[in-house]
Image (tube, rainbow, N blue to C red):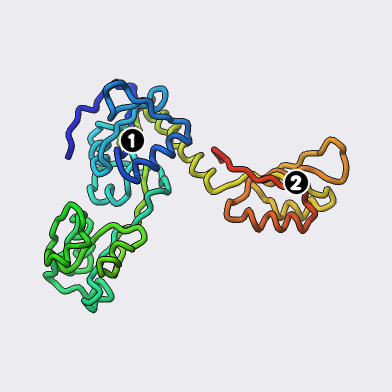
Amino acid sequence: MVVCDCRGDGDMLRIALPNKGRLAEEARSLFDRAGLYAEFREGRSLVASVGPGLEALFVRAQDIPEFVADGAADVGVTGLDLIRELDRAVDELLDLEFGRCRLVVAVTEDSGIRDAAQIAAGTRVATSFPRLALAFFHARMIPVEIVPVSGATEIAPHLGVAAVVVDLVSTGSTLRVNGLREVATIVESTARLVANPGARHEVEKGRTITELVAALESVIRAEHKRYLMANVPRAALDRVKDVLPGISGPTIVDIMDHGEMVAAHSVVDASEVYRTIARLKELGAEGILVTRIERLMP
């Protein structure tokens, strides 16, 4: 594990963020959309201010559960797979809904194995997740030999290192290219916001953590919603309310000419926009406008 002296001002909330890779890019994007922009200190590329009283520490994703559990950081963003593997005492606060992947058991296509239960006792299993792999096979009473590797797990069977691998996949294409087939899923993972249990119980830090969760959650919630506005016939309002249920019903606004049309505003599921527009058109709606939402609070 990388060792660094990350402890700073006791009133500062320290946030550990991944320093490279897809998790790093998506974490920075989420924080940016929440209005938490990283401003790096001169000469310190691993530390940045992300808002009043908030300091980001950019470290390896696999070190973040350790940093948070030890108090070097108060909160952190890392994958559920790493949280489960390291098994440190951290509180999971929020599913950030990016970095989606699976930790799977895979065998060679020519092995004839179709289910993890068919893996023989004593089989060598290559993985960079030894704790999770061992726990998986132990729960099924299959004694295996774990072979820890640090990368390129999928080539282990071709090198004679192991007959089975436990590896992370997104689409599974890398396994297929290397002649491997999935036979079980151990963990389905996404990025999570985690916190040091002690920090959550400090008055000031606890309040700041609650505010941080609310800010990030509002952005995540908004990603799946759209704001829809349309001029609809006043006579069709009862049916419009069925089409635009919104969060607590559509907002209806009189148009200045007080005529037969009124303006209906509502928040709708992004996946339902096309169907909603079609139903509104059937009711005689005009001037339909759909926009993205930056944040959405319940």
Q: Is residue 143 left or right of residue 90?
A: left
Could you say where residue 9 lies in the image, as x and y percent from the top left?
Answer: 29, 20
**22 vs 257: above or below:** below
Q: Residue furthest bottom?
A: 112
Residue 297 in sight here: no
Q: Closer to the camera, 106 or 297?
A: 106
**105 vs 255: above or below:** below
Could you say where residue 134 lies in the image, as x and y percent from the top left?
Answer: 18, 60
Q: Which residue is mark 2?
A: 287
In the rendered structure, which amino acid carries the disc numbered 2?
Gly
Q: CA distance from mark 1 to mark 2?
A: 45 Å
Q: Which residue is mark 1?
A: 75
The reply to whether discs 1 and 2 touch (Cβ–Cβ < 8 Å) is no
**154 vs 78: above or below:** below
Which callout, 1 or 2, points to the residue nearer the camera? 2
Q: Residue at x 66, y 58 (%)?
A: 275
Q: Residue at x 70, y 58 (%)?
A: 278
**Picture quarter containing residue 111?**
bottom left
- Secondary structure state at the residue bearing disc 1: strand
**Picture quarter containing residue 292?**
top right
Q: Which mark is residue 52?
A: none
Q: Residue at x 80, y 43 (%)?
A: 262
Could you say where residue 160 lies in the image, as x and y percent from the top left?
Answer: 12, 67
Q: Closer to the camera, 233 or 290?
A: 290
Residue 149 in sight here: yes
In the rendered structure, which amino acid carries the disc numbered 1?
Val
